[in-house]
Amino acid sequence: MSTPTSNRSTQKPGKLPACDPCRLLKLRCDHARPVCSRCQERGRVADCKYRPRPFKRPVDRVSRRRPREDEPRPVESRTRVSGDASVPSVQYPNPGYLGSSSHTTLFDQLQLQRDSDVSALNQEIESISSAPAAHAIDDSLISRGAELIIDLCRISMTQSFLQLFKKWVDTGTNLALAGPFTGPCASTTVQILSQCDGSLTTAKAIARNLFYHSRRSIKVHSRITFDQYCAEFTGQSARWETLGLFFTAVCRASVDLASAEPLYGSEQKRRKIQKLTLSYSDRCLDLCLPLDCMDDLQLVLQYENFISHSQVDGDQSKDFKFKFLVMIQGYLSWRKLGDVAASLFALGYHQQQTETFRAAPDFLRHLRQVAFCRTYSADKNVSIFLGRPPRILRKFCRFFLPGTYVQSNQEASRKPAIWDLAEMPNFITDSRWAALCAILKEDILDIFTEDNYDKRLQRALLIDADVHAQWNAVPETYRLQCSLKACDRRPVDRDFMVNMKLNYLHVQFLLRLALFRSTSSEPDHALLGISMEMLSLVVETIMLKDQIINSGTSLVWKVAYYGLSAAGLISLTLIKRSFVTENSQISTSKVFQDLSILVGEIERGTLVYMDSPNFILLTRATQTIKSLLDRMMYPFQNMASELDTQISVPVGSEDIVGLDGNWGLWDSNSFQDFEINFWHNLAGHPFLNE
């Protein structure tokens, strides 16, 4: 039996050669013969070979330089994340996007020598890359995949899931990013699961085949068609991402459709289906990530999985009664959004001006633009909602707005966007507007950090002009200029229009909030008017929820994000004495009506249920608003005297209530997210605690 030192006579003293896989991947090799322990553990016995002359340099050399654009590029030992994935490459390690300041780029600019035997090196790399990918998959990972296949076969609900998916798609909606792929993914998933007979052997065979294709790069070139691209991950080339997208779509369908007999007819069964299908989506994604094969398909699954978690688990981050459970749910959604942002950066999609990005086919380039814009918008919205700093900053990015007319984020920030007047509202236009509003929101968040009020006002005036210019540039076919009831459009189109209008109002709301002076005795009439309009639209959407279809922003998110912000500002204004005595232009009956409807829908359970997303936040806000409405039923002339005679201050409220009765929730001049703490503190106001 040979030993690691059996060939030392032909090698340099004290130095042993590494096998080809360890050498190419720059891993430590124990030099064992005939197979090193690392290759043995990784299942690469056939690839473990030692070069006959490992320490001999070739005589001929070629200079290492950058190839020209028209010159074929040699295969490199590192994976380059680019639009052309047809070039064979080693899947691990995956460094991701390497910018102009990275160490790799700097060293590539040096005129270094490289081996002349490039073709031999390429053959070695290709032999490793073309080896059966499933051999490199850990047995425990294959076992996890087989367990998932067996679970799916055991419940025997695939056909029911497919019917629910088709019923949902027939309404005209789909997944915002993965919509074009859900149909092929659904048929492929049904076909794969029909091959399982319930045995562990069959399940492992299916899982091994899914891993084999999941490890392979999706071949992309500039002339590839959409059908050819889909064929890379559907049919016989199915991957774990394929199954994950189907179950994500089914989860979203159960979120949108209140009833889908015989799968579910009650809210309890509906929530069970939501959590079950979302767990399947999670498991498919967890099986993809360890493979370290970053691509567009995995990015799409990550984004849609995050959106489903936001709609099923919610985004709230803390509470007093159910603190541990809510923190886990809120953290999970926040973390998954961070994972999507990290993948975008690793793929280099935050720098879309590069030749590599532009070389991709049109449908794939648009997909990447939509992916970045929607993630960029979600980053701003969730950051504001949770009161956390954003992860994606525009000054470090160069992205283009999706749609027929290509426009960069720098151009959009200086002049109104250009729209295609013939295009109807869809996910492209929705993503385009969401990105524009996110740019404005990021600028507004910068204003909150400005201590000088005059400078803050000056910057706010410029942003205000941009807000109106962008909204006026939007075609009238996209804008909701009448009541939702009078809007004669498809249910999904109505929801698109509601989303755009609420986003526009929210930008104005944040801008006025940035200029709000809590020490002023005068209420901000403009801010109050915007709040009332935003709350009124949310309430109308609640009342007509059966006549709209979720187009990417769920009704619960609309209420929690837009509705509570407006209701919080209105509640603060109602408590002020100046509101009653001076705001004669405000319809008090309309305010009471909208707040009462919001409270009634939440209390009766027609909007949220016990374990629905953001249930605790909405319940806390409802209790406070209801207490306010009960107190407001007293004659208005008694309110001022009650406030003047109120001298008791609740315990723990000294930092928010002054002796003069001024309510200083915004004394810190930071943006207010109207989350749990806001409603908890507002409930402690003396006016509501007599």
Image (tube, rainbow, N blue to C red):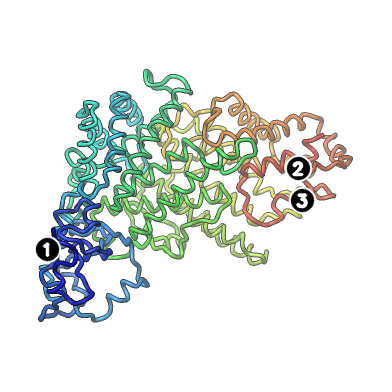
Circles 3 and 2: CB distance less than 8 Å? Answer: no
At 19% across and 29% down in the image, what residue appears?
195
Q: Residue drawn 64% across and 62% down?
A: 457
- The numbered disc on residue 579 is 2
Q: Kindly identify the amino acid type of the residue bearing the numbered disc 1.
A: Gln
> Label 1 neighbourhood size at 10 Å, few (<14), some (14-19), many (20+)?
few
| Amino acid at the residue labelled 3 | Asp
Task: Tell me the crowding category of disc 3: few under 14, some 14 to 19, or many 20 or more residues within 10 angstroms, Cα based.
Answer: few
Q: Which residue is mark 1?
A: 123
Eyeballing the image, is 69 above or below 57?
above
* Residue 273 image offset from top left, x and y in percent: 41, 27
Numbered label tally: 3
- The tag earlier along the polypeptide, 2 or 1, is 1
Residue 213 picture location, percent across and down: 21, 45
Q: Identify the element where label 1 is drawn.
A: helix
Number of the front mark, 2 or 1? 1
Depth order, front residue of 312/140: 140
Looking at marks 3 and 1 on the same chain, the residue that comes earlier in the sequence is marked by: 1
Q: Which numbered disc flags the more N-terminal residue, 3 or 2? A: 2
User: Is residue 621 visible in the rendered structure shown here?
Assistant: no
**Of marks 3 and 1, the one in the foreground:** 1
Question: Could you tell me which secondary element the residue under label 2 belongs to?
Answer: helix
Along the viewing direction, whichever of 506 and 293 lies nearer the viewer: 293
Q: Residue furthest front?
A: 1
Give left or right: position of 364 versus 492. Answer: left
Specify the quadrant that holds the N terminus.
bottom left
- Horizontal arrangement in the rendering, residue 204 relative to residue 577 (left or right): left
- Which quadrant does the C terminus fall into? top right
Say what amino acid the circle numbered 2 marks: Phe
Query: Do we see residue 340 in this rendering?
Result: yes
Can you tell which quarter of the image residue 536 is in? top right
